[in-house]
Image: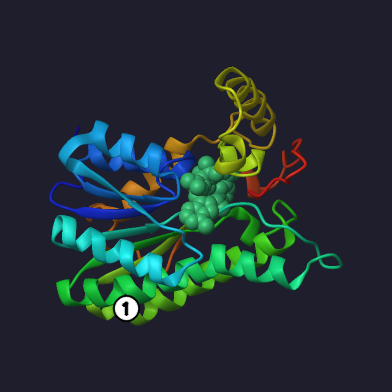
Amino acid sequence: MTGRLSGKTALITGGTSGIGEATVELFVAEGCKVMIAGRNAEKGEAMAARLGESARFVTCDITQEAQIKAAIEATVEAFGRLDCLFSNAGGPTRGGPDTMEAEDYRYAMDLLLGSVLFGIRHAAPIMKAQGRGAIINNSSVAALRGHMGGYLYSIAKAGVKRATELAGMELGQYGITVNCISPGAIATPIFFGGSKASAGLDPAHADAKMAKLTRNLAKATPLHRSGLPHDIATAALFLASDEGAYINSHDLVVDGGMIAGGRTSFETTAAGANV
Ligand SMILES: NC(=O)c1ccc[n+]([C@@H]2O[C@H](COP(=O)([O-])OP(=O)(O)OC[C@H]3O[C@@H](n4cnc5c(N)ncnc54)[C@H](O)[C@@H]3O)[C@@H](O)[C@H]2O)c1
């Protein structure tokens, strides 16, 4: 541990799986006090108990503005301040240009874009009063080019990028940075329909599926290896730490070079490759 987040506090949504889970672990190891927000209370409470004084868990469905606001308030109540909000949670979406239903649209926008907008909305006043803060949103390379994610997924993630740029421009004067990360192909349960869908798999089957996914995703990057949750956690650490203090309104692409071109084809599941 090097204490790069010593004295800081963070709220991480989707903190019980994949990228969020790796980020919780890394932030705590770097001296941060972390509120883990998620829907899986059993796993979240177990993580918090294992991490001790440095972590707490709050139940939060990010499609509900009131629950996002409550999670932010719970963080301040538990730790006294909010230095970083990592709006990370997300999942696959349904529907294409000629098949989407109104319900698919509303769910995708609430889940992937609304959650980011309301996170900023309720974190910013607290950070303004503190005179500093770092908001990090999880976007995706699907926002940037090609057809790597679902239709609505890609559109919502493109909105995350613009929300990040604009919010950073408005909030920078108060010492608040707003940035997003665009992960490439990262081996997580999202490829199996999200952590909820994969939670029912028996552990041996889940491990075998993850090993196959990791081999498949390796084909998509010039680095010839799959992205791992830790690869994104280290980017979030950089943006949350004082080392990232002058980075604002930025989209940090962490994809092993995937969108530069070349090796972009890889097998996906029926749920689609929402990368
Ligand atoms: N894995 C990739 O290749 C990849 C690539 C680009 C972007 N992303 C983004 O990274 C983020 C994390 O995804 P991941 O790959 O770690 O997947 P994951 O399925 O392992 O984790 C997603 C987390 O979000 C939570 N979540 C989903 N819907 C929620 C809701 N309504 N309320 C609260 N929590 C909810 C899940 O329970 C889970 O904890 C997502 O925003 C995803 O779009 C992932």
Residue 254 picture location, percent across and down: 51, 47
Residue drawn at x 19%, y 36% is 52
State the quadrant of the N terminus: top left
Residue drawn at x 17%, y 73% is 131
Disc 1: CA contacts within 10 A as few (<14), some (14-19) or many (>=20): many
Q: Which residue is mark 1?
A: 171
Ligand 1 within 8 Å of disc 1? The answer is no
Q: Is residue 110 left or right of residue 218?
A: left
The vertical placement of 265 against 60, above or below, is above
Q: Is residue 155 left or right of residue 9?
A: right
One can see residue 56 in this view: yes
Residue drawn at x 47%, y 38% is 229
Please, what is the three-letter code of the amino acid marked with disc 1? Leu
In-front residue for pair 245/101: 101
Residue drawn at x 42%, y 41% is 16
What is the secondary structure assignment of the residue under circle 1?
Answer: helix
Residue 39 picture location, percent across and down: 45, 50
In-front residue for pair 125/162: 125
| Colouring rule applied to residues | rainbow
One can see residue 257 in this view: no
Residue 68 picture location, percent across and down: 38, 65
- Residue located farthest toward the top when viewing the structure as drawn: 204
The part of the image, by quadrant, that contains residue 23 is top left
- Residue located farthest toward the front when viewing the structure as drawn: 42
Q: Is residue 53 left or right of residue 173?
A: left
